Amino acid sequence: MSPDPCPASGLIRPPAQRVAAEVNGRYYDICIGYDLLATAGLFCQELGWRGRCLVVTHPCLSHLYWPGLEQNLCRHDFSPQLVLVDEGEESKSLTTAGFLYEALYRTGADRHTPILALGGGVIGDLAGFVAATYQRGVPLAHFPTTLLAQVDSSIGGKTALNYHHLKNQIGLYYQPSLVLSDLGTLSSITARQIQSGMAEVVKYGMIASSDLFAYVESRAQLLLALQPEVLQHVVATCACIKAEIVAADERDKGQRRLLNFGHTVAHAAEAVSNFSLTHGEAVAIGMVVAARLACRLGMFSQEEASRLVVVLEKLGLPTVLPPFPAGEFMAAMQHDKKARNGKLSFVLPRRIGEAVVISEVSPETILQEISR
Ligand code: GLY
């Protein structure tokens, strides 16, 4: 599905959209629109859920959304229990997972007790991991509140924890039963977080849809201003693309690897910058490196590489890697989860809207490209 472009028209909010996701014969809805959290209880009830449920979020978000969410869940036959975890990557730990297992136990949760993950990527990864492992799996719904989570991490079932220096290396695939992307929640995140999510939007344009890319090119300012119709069109289009890719390849063996466009360099850039670059900023830089490498290999045109740089700049994203120690950068790339025998698979664009996975790229080749 590819929603038609909507003309910008003030602040009128469009009706919510639904994207049907399917993974190995299991179906779930991804709903994108405004004021969805206010009716979350109804969405959950429609899944046949009722009674106890655990809402996992962090204090700032609970302050904003818990009163309305609790009221609506209670109105639809739920006895919701709120569990707060600290904001930030540190919460993606075995310790915090243990804290959530305890909370589930104390609540009297059984294997039908749903976990509702209200937050960005950290909450989604953590709550997803706990849902996948408590009593070998309890139902899960994602209520993503960042752009990055709405267009990417809440869809497709990846869950993850960090373990000491191993970032995102502990995890499993576990599909949610529902994703509710309430676009109103994006008004409460920082401009930098919005820009960071935009890098993933551009990624979808680059790997799968020249129409999406052109749409973002021509409406970058409206998007950054969160113009409702433009924003909803873009989030729904990204959700469609991601759902289609995951339906074809849940376990990252084929097509799903395209979602890694820009990410090999990005993960290393995040690490060597000591996470002063956000994930999206690092992905923006990584996509430009990949595009330049593709140009050098004669696979991609300079004109299209320039369009990529220009759209990222319009979205306020960096396109050049800050100075870094080459040795550290190489080491960080070699630890990429997708590395095989020291060689990396690297996603390169062929044209805007189409990319391919190239196996066995040596980290030296990438480093050469970065150092040019
Ligand atoms: N975020 C990339 C993936 O879900 O595969």
Image: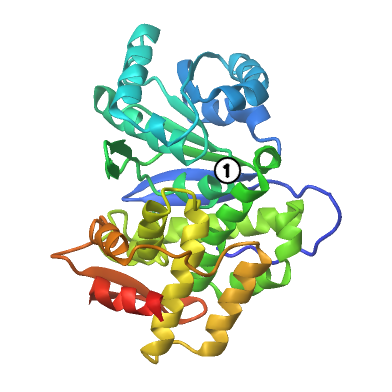
Please tell me which residue lies in front, 317 or 176. 317
Of residues 248 and 205, the one drawn nearer to the viewer in this rendering: 205
Which quadrant, please, contains the N terminus? bottom right
Residue furthest left in the image: 341
Q: Is residue 253 depicted above or below 69 in this figure? A: below
Q: How many marks are shown on the rendered structure?
A: 1
Picture residue at 32% right of the left edge, 73% below the top: 367
Q: Is residue 4 visible?
A: no
The location of residue 340, given as percent across then percent down, is: 17, 64
Is 372 on the left-hand or right-hand side of 174?
Answer: right
Q: Nearer the viewer, residue 140 or 269?
A: 269
Assign the C terminus to one quadrant of the image: bottom left
Quadrant assignment, res 201 = bottom right
Q: Residues within 10 Å of mark 1 (few under 14, many from 20)?
A: many
Residue under the point 60% across and 29% down: 40
Left or right of 350 in this view: 314? right
Three-letter amino acid code at disc 1? Thr
Task: Please report the residue visible at 33 percent of the width from the left and 40 percent of the height from the top.
Answer: 160
Position above or below: 294 against 49: below
Camera-side residue of 152 and 360: 360
Residue indicated by mark 1: 146
Q: Is residue 242 visible?
A: yes
- Where in the figure is residue 69, as x and y percent of width and height? 62, 22
Instruction: Residue 49: give x, y in percent of width and height.
Output: 47, 23
Position of residue 129 in the picture relative to residue 226 (left or right): left
